[in-house]
Amino acid sequence: MVWLDCITGARPSELLGLRRKSIDFQHKCIWILEAVNNGRAHTPKYHRSNRPIPLTAEDMERLPGISASGRMRRLRIGLSR
């Protein structure tokens, strides 16, 4: 999670909101579509926050492992998604 925070510049709440559908392998980017605050998912703070973040091919290779650990983290804080 720290690695993803460093390379994207996304807010921590936005990173917690990442789901599998947020990853666009074809265009090599992740989409910020949701954020998590106080254990609840919601749309990002501003309409401009709903954005793609381009990633390198090396970064994209690391994402499958991140998505599994992110799901476990969301389950621990009480989110079912």
Image: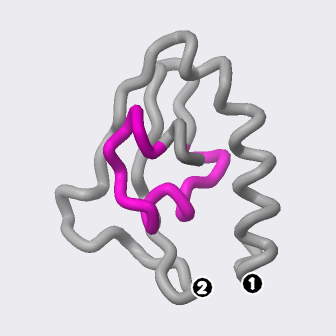
Residue 33: give x, y in percent of width and height. 43, 58
- Asked if 74 appears above or below 10 in the picture, the reply is below
Residue 78 shows which numbered tag? 1
Please tell me how many numbered marks the rendered image carries.
Answer: 2
Q: Nearer the viewer, residue 26 or 17?
A: 17
Tags 2 and 1 in contact by the CB under 8 Å rule?
yes
Q: Residue at x 54, y 63 (%)?
A: 17
Residue 45 part of the magenta-drawn span: no
Q: Quadrant of the C terminus?
A: bottom right
Q: Secondary structure at mark 2?
A: loop
The quarter holding residue 43 reads: bottom left
Q: Residues within 10 Å of mark 2 (few under 14, many from 20)?
A: some
| Horizontal side, residue 33 vs residue 69: left or right | left
Mark 2, residue position: 39
Q: Earlier in the sequence, mark 2 or mark 1?
A: 2
Residue 38: give x, y in percent of width and height. 52, 88
Q: Amino acid at mark 2?
A: Gly
Scheme of image coloration: one colour
Residue 8 part of the magenta-drawn span: yes
Q: Nearer the viewer, residue 29 or 10?
A: 10
| Horizontal side, residue 26 vs residue 13: left or right | right
Residue 28: give x, y in percent of width and height. 47, 21
- Asked if 57 appears above or below 19 in the picture, the reply is above
Q: Amino acid at mark 1?
A: Gly
Q: Secondary structure at mark 1?
A: loop
Bounds of the magenta span?
5-22
- Asked if 80 appears above or below 68 in the picture, the reply is below
Q: Residues within 10 Å of mark 1 (few under 14, many from 20)?
A: few
